[in-house]
Image (cartoon, rainbow, N blue to C red):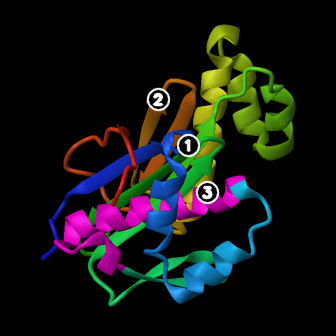
Amino acid sequence: MTSTGQVLLWAVDADAVAPEALERHAAWLGASERARCARFVRPERRRQFIIGRALLRRALGSLLGTEPAAICLEERPGLAPALSPQADVDFSISHSGRWVACAAGAGVGLGLGLDIERIDAARDVMALAEQAFSAHDVAVLRASEPASRRVAFYRMWCAHEARIKLGRASVAEYPLALPGLAGMLASTQPLETVPVLTLLRLGAP
């Protein structure tokens, strides 16, 4: 049974996951996931991938009343993985630097798109905005107070990426934050409660 209206929003500090815990969670991966994971050249990217899939399986297991290791995810080139068998749940994974996050929710027609970004104090946000944002958004950002401009930039950036991941028109958007991290959750439906990004420790399965 799914839990109607429930949305789980979890983040993990990948640097805090012990190597033995990482390998035990890697055993949860299906054949198509293992094939993709093996193609990653950088250890950091492999780590992010395994943690993201472990975190997602734990969230889906909680929603569906299933053991996380029993959750079957199939790779789809250029798309998010597919849950097999299908259920009335949707999910989204994002990572940035040491942080990995996932959103998972239950409900007919619910769609979720999540993006997180590590805040880089050295980044020239106006130069990047001029390359990536519309003229209107650049003007809004330029008009913002210098002290709050970086926060505004990351909120705009995360919103843009979350909408792309959602792949449909967003009806509701929820800004997220942890120290040094910005994020946005886009949803096709207003959520019953405002989601809070919760930091978890990913220990032994």
Kind of element beneath mark 3? helix
Q: Is residue 58 magenta?
A: yes
**Which numbered disc flags the more N-terminal residue, 3 or 1?**
3
**Which numbered disc flags the more N-terminal residue, 1 or 2?**
1
Q: Position of residue 72 (x, y in %)?
A: 39, 83
Task: Report the residue marked by disc 2.
Answer: 178
Callout 2 amino acid: Leu
Which of pointers 1 and 2 indicates the residue nearer the eye?
1
Labels 1 and 2 touching (C-beta < 8 A): yes
Q: Position of residue 185 (x, y in %)?
A: 44, 49
Label 3 crowd bin: few (<14), some (14–19), many (20+), radius 10 Å? many
Left or right: where does residue 4 sit relative to residue 101? left
Which of pointers 2 and 3 indicates the residue nearer the eye?
3
Q: Place residue 119 in its image quadrant.
A: top right
Q: Position of residue 46 (x, y in %)?
A: 66, 62
Q: Nearer the viewer, residue 57 or 140?
A: 57
Callout 3 amino acid: Arg
Q: Is residue 29 magenta?
A: no
Task: Report the residue marked by disc 1.
Answer: 99
* Residue appearing at x 74%, y 68% in the figure: 40
Quarter of the picture containing the C terminus is bottom left
Q: Nearer the viewer, residue 200 or 89?
A: 200
Labels 3 and 1 touching (C-beta < 8 A): no
Which of pointers 3 and 1 indicates the residue nearer the eye?
3
Task: Report the residue marked by disc 3.
Answer: 47
